[in-house]
Image (tube, rainbow, N blue to C red):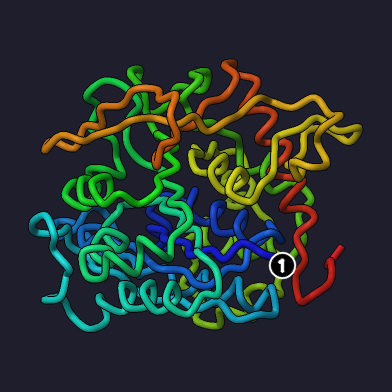
Amino acid sequence: MKIPLIHITDLYHPPQDPDDHFDLATVAALHEYDLLGVILDVSERFLHAAPRGFDISRDPGFVPVVQLASLLGRTITAALGPAEPLKHSGDTASDRQPREKAGIELLLSLVRSSKQPVTVSVVGSARVLAAAFNLEPDLLRGGIKAVLLNAGTSAGGHDEWNVGLDRMAYIDLWRSGLPIHWYPCANEKGAFDEAHQRGTYWRATHGELLHDIPAQLEAWFRYALTGSNRGDILHALDEGGKGYVWENILHEKRNMWSTASLIAGAGRMLARTPGGWRFVASNEAQDSECWPMSLEPIAAGISDAGVVDWQPSTEPAVHRIFKRQEGRGYGAAMTEALNALLRAMECHGEKLR
């Protein structure tokens, strides 16, 4: 039976950070998941051009979701969440515009209608999930199997990016009692440490990640990475595109954090096969060399400043924290495995090449 998944992502077009496109493609490529819906976790300051906003004008990422649904030949339900942080602990966001409450309502509806407890992946802020919990705590306590939380720092007082998007929501989520599988985006050295045992961070060039992937999937990434303003968003996926702009983009590096959570949530491992590093189902990786990864039980609490205080637990615990074998080779292995996953992705029900 497939794993019912709700994916909460700070996905925009043009991208604010294109790692969210790679995360969405990863979810779509993992056949273990039944993707119930995508909830767009946007922040007001990234929707508007400066000086009102952060830099340039963006839209919530409905376009990449629709494009990907077309490539897969399936429906992907999507809705928008609140664009401003929660105002206080227990905030249900009930005073927001109807379109911003749609994401909260979608999450509740999907949990309510699922025949089994769902997994929720959070690769941006905790706003949508926290507001939904504040609105219907009993439903979510009984209906969520695990929260794949990509946020926060495993040590030190660093103000990690996703926490900063909505600190109150992060605090409310940790205090909710929901089962958090915690994949910290930073540690005592910051958010860009490729070697740390608690670190999820790795990076690769676009060229390494997109090498020899199906043509239409490459077009999907190209539409995003070039910030295309073409209105014929589906025809754009049927056309090739090269040239110096695209070649320059392929040489750019992409910072990645959330991949480990999505792979582990699907029950896969990072294993060396005769063909190279791959994301392999756990029951098929027993005789392979694996990059050790685990989720360790912890006792955890959170301060009013949004700092998680945790200790390893020898008892069964509702919260777990990511751990992996140290070493910078992790990034090279993840790069090879993610590229292989994307190369094998099926579009329109069959491989394009």
Closer to us: 136 or 308: 136
> How many dots with numbers?
1
The vertical placement of 135 against 305, above or below, is: below
Q: Quadrant of residue 234?
A: bottom right
Q: State whether residue 221 appears in this view.
A: yes
Q: State whether residue 48 appears in this view.
A: no
Closer to us: 56 or 299: 299
For the point 76% across and 45% down, which residue is it? 281
Q: Is 209 on the left or on the right of 255, as rendered?
A: right
Q: Quadrant of residue 8?
A: bottom left
Q: Looking at the figure, which quarter contains the C terminus?
A: bottom right
The vertical placement of 70 against 177, above or below, is: below
The vertical placement of 302 against 344, above or below, is: above
Q: Is 154 on the left or on the right of 99, as rendered?
A: right
For the point 13% across and 60% down, which residue is it? 90
Callout 1: 10 Å neighbours few (<14), some, many (20+)? many
Q: Residue furthest left?
A: 88
- Give the x, y percent position of residue 264: 60, 43
Q: Is 85 on the left or on the right of 345, as rendered?
A: left
Q: Looking at the figure, which quarter contains the N terminus?
A: bottom right
- Give the x, y percent position of residue 236: 62, 75
The vertical placement of 333 against 30, above or below, is: above
Give the residue number, with chain letter if any, for mark 1.
216
For the point 40% across and 25% down, which residue is it? 313
Residue type marked 1: Gln
- Give the x, y percent position of residue 135: 22, 70
For the point 31% across and 52% down, which residue is it? 125
Q: Residue furthest front?
A: 315
Closer to us: 246 or 99: 99
